[in-house]
Amino acid sequence: MPIANQMVKMVEGMEMVKQMFEEGTRLKAKHGPDKVFDFSIGNPDVPPPAEFKKVLKELVNDESLGHGYTPNTGFPHVRKAVADYLSNVHDVKIAPDFIIMTVGAAGALNDALNAVINPGEEILIPSPYFIGYDHYAFIARAAIKTVPTDSDFHLDTAAIESAITDKTRVMVINSPNNPTGAVYSAAELAELGRVLDNASHKFGKRIYLVADEPYRKIVYDLEVPSIFKAYPHSIIVSSYSKELSLAGERIGYLAVNPDAEDAQMVTSAATVINTMLCVNAPSLMQHAIARLQGTTVDVSIYRRRRDMLCQGLSEIGYEFHVPEGAFYLFPKSPIPDDVKFTQLLKEELILTVPGIGFDGPGYFRLSYAVPDSTITGSMEGFKRAFEKA
């Protein structure tokens, strides 16, 4: 075998994703891009706020701006801006020393997991879950253990309590959630904090809670509660990919709860990992987001699309929970075989992702980070596929 044995499965998984994207390109070339309705990719398409372009122009024209290496944790003034903003959001005083600027939320997750996990330990994740977590667990040489959510895709804390063992080192939650759109309540998080604290004492090892929050500001009629208030031994990883529509710019951060056990050591370890993986976050984007704390894309665009999609599918007869946040809908497949049903949709030139890819068999995921015309133009195809099923 010319590649490492442990890479074979990873390569096969990426080949499946590649084939899905290539199929979309092929269909669009054959039928025309306006005849293919692609809901498969969670790529934010709402324009960045006008403030971003203004700040970027100012930075580009700033002759004093350098482009060399930054401190591994990020520029001090950037970390201070992030720390000050997060302190207000979470009502917890966070010093810049507990902030690391990263290459997106992916970089932050890699930093956090590798900082605290020993090889062979487990990451507990509510299911359905974002498939990228498999990759981050692989890099950390950890095993993923899933725990089911309830019928609304919210936390089942009794199931979580039963699933924790002496191998559990980290619990990762993603709220607002990809793929379900669920937003966990303050009561859920408080109960989760109690469960994790009790389990930490039971097994004699600290279990850390990592919250993956790139969709925190993409919510509808509610706010995302703070995990820092629910459980002190917590780490937030996030990015500006969704809230500023800067996915391709790869800028994010890691924030360690200052009240966490060994908070300074955890931050130091995450800094070392950040140095190993990427040296430092992109310097230009660091300068930009320092001036954009609290700025967000126009979330009403995503809300409108969510409502359009939900209304259209509901009238056809699809069953789903209305998303509370993010920009994904996770409807129930009309037939048990979600892979077969997504093939029926593809025959109608509608591209979706089967739920089994998120450990959610019997469902399928739609991203409504798409033009309005994709939603309206697809409804007849959704109807025909439903009737075939």
Image (spheres, rainbow, N blue to C red):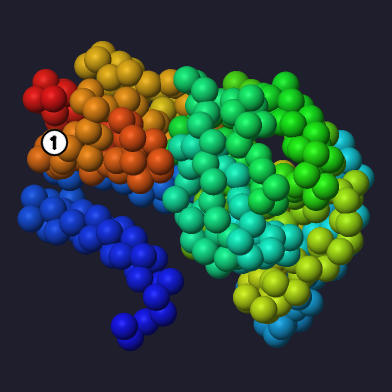
Is residue 2 visible from the viewing direction of this image?
yes
Residue nearer the viewer, 297 or 198: 198
User: Few, some or many C-alpha atoms within 10 Å of disc 1 (few <14, some 14-19, many ≥20)?
Assistant: many
What is the x, y in percent for residue 169?
Answer: 70, 51
Residue nearer the viewer, 112 or 96: 112
Q: Quadrant of the N terminus?
A: bottom left
Asked whether, in this view, residue 189 is left or right of residue 244, the answer is: right
Asked whether, in this view, residue 216 is left or right of residue 313, the answer is: right
What is the x, y in percent for residue 304?
Answer: 43, 27
Q: Quadrant of the C terminus?
A: top left
Residue located 21% across and 54% down the image: 24
Q: How many numbered marks appear?
A: 1
Q: Which residue is mark 1?
A: 344
* Amino acid type, callout 1: Leu
Residue 55, above or below 69: above
What is the x, y in percent for residue 45?
Answer: 42, 48
Residue located 8% across and 50% down the image: 31
Residue nearer the viewer, 347 or 332: 332
| Residue 227 figure quarter | top right
Residue located 31% across and 58% down the image: 17
Residue located 78% across and 44% down the image: 203
Is residue 372 visible from the viewing direction of this image?
no
Considering the numbered disc 1 on the image, is that residue within a helix, a strand or a loop? helix
What is the x, y in percent for residue 190?
Answer: 76, 27
Asked whether, in this view, residue 89 is left or right of residue 341, the answer is: right
Residue 73, above or below 329: below
